[in-house]
Amino acid sequence: MNSRSEQSAEGTFEDDLEWCYDAVQGVSRTFAITIQELEEPMSRHICIGYLLCRVADTIEDAGHIPPEEQSRLLREYRAVLDTEDPTTVHEFRESVDPWVPPADDRTDDWEVVAQAARVVRTFESLDPGPREAARPPVRELVGGMAEFVDRYADEGGLRIETLDELEEYCWYAAGTVGTLVTNLVSRNASTDVTDTLRGNARAFALLLQLVNVAKDVADDYREEDNVYLPARWLREEGVDPENVTDPENVAAVARVIIEVTDHASGYLDGAQTWLEAMPEEDGNTLSAWAIPFLLAVGTIRELRERPDEVVEEGGVKVPREEVGALLERFATGVPRSALGDLRERIEHQPLHHYSNGQGM
């Protein structure tokens, strides 16, 4: 890795951190809310850790990069994050450069890849504690993505076969992020709290990722040539995974979406336990993680009501008014003891309906 003096010559930490905060706004609306709800120093730790993961995620999703090259790039990036490996982020940036779109054509995700040296430089400037809490799960995520690219190198895109394989993928894509967050928020927690967090971090992360799988079926296939719905379940409904977005398969695919949604809902209790145990210190806040949890609850509700729209219209989302009502609710303060009630309300109907006198 570059020395601290070499890093500082390329830009101040404050400039780099400001860029990272701006970058998160572009790549994930949901995670941007989390970052906004956090306080320092946790906000910077989570922001930078997330961007490290986003570099790998963008490469793994890139349909224009041949699988063998994707795998090589992911493994080189993983080596950059190994303190005992001499591979530098600048070497990785040179390797990925042929696949980075021109500046005028870049998405926000590809801009993060283009600025990978800046992201890694900012990460290496963090204090040792948060840096070493984040490094192992990020490297596990990158290695897992490379493994899945290798597994489906001959398919052109990912084709998840079974529920067990879907959970394996979700672990690498999100479970490792759950570990990263847990490592950071529990650094000063008691043994009992830490054990509870670690025992339920998987549930929190897999809930969010499985909901994403269910709501993004059409976009994942059309934009990335990936099918995450278990092929075994699709075939039981008479659907070839290659035809997952065909109009004649809408009803059958919708039934599989409901199956994945129901499976995701099985993680709600564990995710809530994780939230209720999570310490609020070092800039961590309940709202930062409870809001994504409750948005997932609302998305599950929407998926159950209109799963066909995932295929026909490219996805479902909670109403914008509900997002606003949720943010407003947490702005006035929500105790942990109210999480269960909020979850139950949102499971039944959008939160803003209660505010408008339409609820129970």
Image: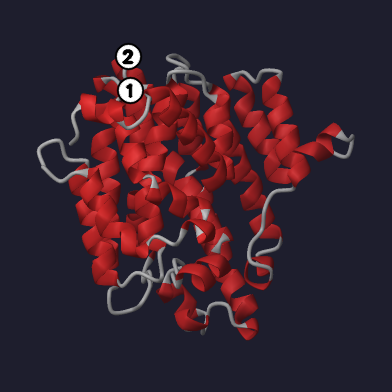
Give the labeled residue for mark 1: 194
- Quadrant that contains the N terminus: top left
| Nearer the observer, 135 or 194 | 135
Towards the viewer: 148 or 205: 148
Q: How is the image coloured?
A: secondary structure
Quadrant, the C terminus:
top right
242 over 104 or under it: above or below: below
For badge 2, the amino acid type reads Ser
In percent of width and height, residue 351 lies at 75, 38
Total marks drawn?
Answer: 2
- Mark 2 neighbour class, 10 Å CA radius: few under 14, some 14 to 19, many 20 or more: few
Query: Of helix, strand and loop, which one carries label 2?
Result: loop
244 on left or right of 144: right
From this view, report whether residue 212 is shown above or below residue 337. below
Q: Is residue 62 left or right of residue 35?
A: left
Question: With respect to residue 281, does 341 lie above or below?
Answer: below
- The local crowd at label 1, few if under 14, some if 14 to 19, many if 20 or more residues have their Cα within 10 Å, is many
Q: 351 above or below 330?
A: below
Closest to the observer, 273 or 61? 61
Give the x, y percent position of residue 298: 66, 46
Q: CA distance from mark 1 to mark 2?
A: 6 Å
Q: Looking at the image, which residue sits at the far front?
A: 9
Image quarter of residue 144: bottom left
User: Could you tell me which residue is drawn at 50 percent across and 46 percent down?
Assistant: 208
Residue 190's disc is: 2
Q: Residue at x 64, y 85 (%)?
A: 248
Snapshot quadrant of residue 101? bottom left
- Choose top left, top right, bottom left or bottom right for residue 68: bottom left
Pointers 1 and 2 in contact (CB under 8 A)? yes
Image spot of residue 288 (x, y percent): 54, 28
Q: Amino acid at mark 1?
A: Thr
